[in-house]
């Protein structure tokens, strides 16, 4: 059983691959000055980068979990999501409202994908 870790940090690994499945940690925007749509775009760009490191891409996303600071921003998040996702390869998805790690974080997304 081989586990490949990418960017293994002091508390968690950003992305790892095991048995043909890629697991990404929850991703947040680096620039917190944007609104929910912009932060979602930033997060999705990070997801693209990390999936590529593990030999995957958004067409292979199996599952996505999305946390929003305020569920009233659901449509704003979806504006970015709908532009990003491949409509022929939709994953299962859950979106919930949650208190995030800091006041500036408006969205966090975690995905699981096939390698």
Image (cartoon, helix red, strand yellow):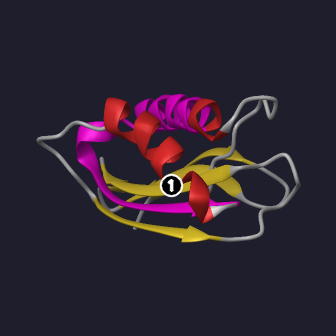
Which of 25 and 91 lies nearest the eye of the viewer? Answer: 91
Which of 72 and 31 lies nearest the eye of the viewer? Answer: 72
| Side of 29 relative to 22 (left or right) | right
Residue that label 1 marks = 74
Which of 23 and 59 lies nearest the eye of the viewer? Answer: 59
The answer to whether residue 22 is visible is no
Which of 67 and 77 lies nearest the eye of the viewer? Answer: 77
Confirm whether the magenta stretch covers residue 68. yes
Confirm whether the magenta stretch covers residue 87. no
- Point out residue 11 in the picture as x, y percentages from the top left corner: 82, 61
Disc 1 crowd, CA 10 A, few/some/many (<14, 14-19, 20+): some
Q: Tell me which residue sits at (67%, 61%) in the image.
A: 70
| Side of 96 relative to 18 (left or right) | right
For label 1, the SS is helix
- Point out residue 46 in the picture as x, y percentages from the top left corner: 57, 33
Q: Tell me which residue sits at (50%, 36%) in the image.
A: 44
Residue 42, by quadrant, is top right
The quarter of the image holding the N terminus is: bottom left
| Side of 68 relative to 48 (left or right) | right
Q: Is residue 97 above or below residue 42?
A: below
Residue extending furthest toward the left = 88
Residue 58, by quadrant, is top left
Q: Is residue 65 above or below residue 49?
A: below
Q: Which region is colored magenta? A: 40-69
| Side of 2 relative to 16 (left or right) | left
- Point out residue 98 in the picture as x, y percentages from the top left corner: 69, 71
Q: Tell me which residue sits at (42%, 45%) in the image.
A: 78
The answer to whether residue 114 is visible is yes
- Point out residue 107 in the picture as x, y percentages from the top left corner: 64, 51
Q: Tell me which residue sits at (56%, 49%) in the image.
A: 15
């Amino acid at each position: 059983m081989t586990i490949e870790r990418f960017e293994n940090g002091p508390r968690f690994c950003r992305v790892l691959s095991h048995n043909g499945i890629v697991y990404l940690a929850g991703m947040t925007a680096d620039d917190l000055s944007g609104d929910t749509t912009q932060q979602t775009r930033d997060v999705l760009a990070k997801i693209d980068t990390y999936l590529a490191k593990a030999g995957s891409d958004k067409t292979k996303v199996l599952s996505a979990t999305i946390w929003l600071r305020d569920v009233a921003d659901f449509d704003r998040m979806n504006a970015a999501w709908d532009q990003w996702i491949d409509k022929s390869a939709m994953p299962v998805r859950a979106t919930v409202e949650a208190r995030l790690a800091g006041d500036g974080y408006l969205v966090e997304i975690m995905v699981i994908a096939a390698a």
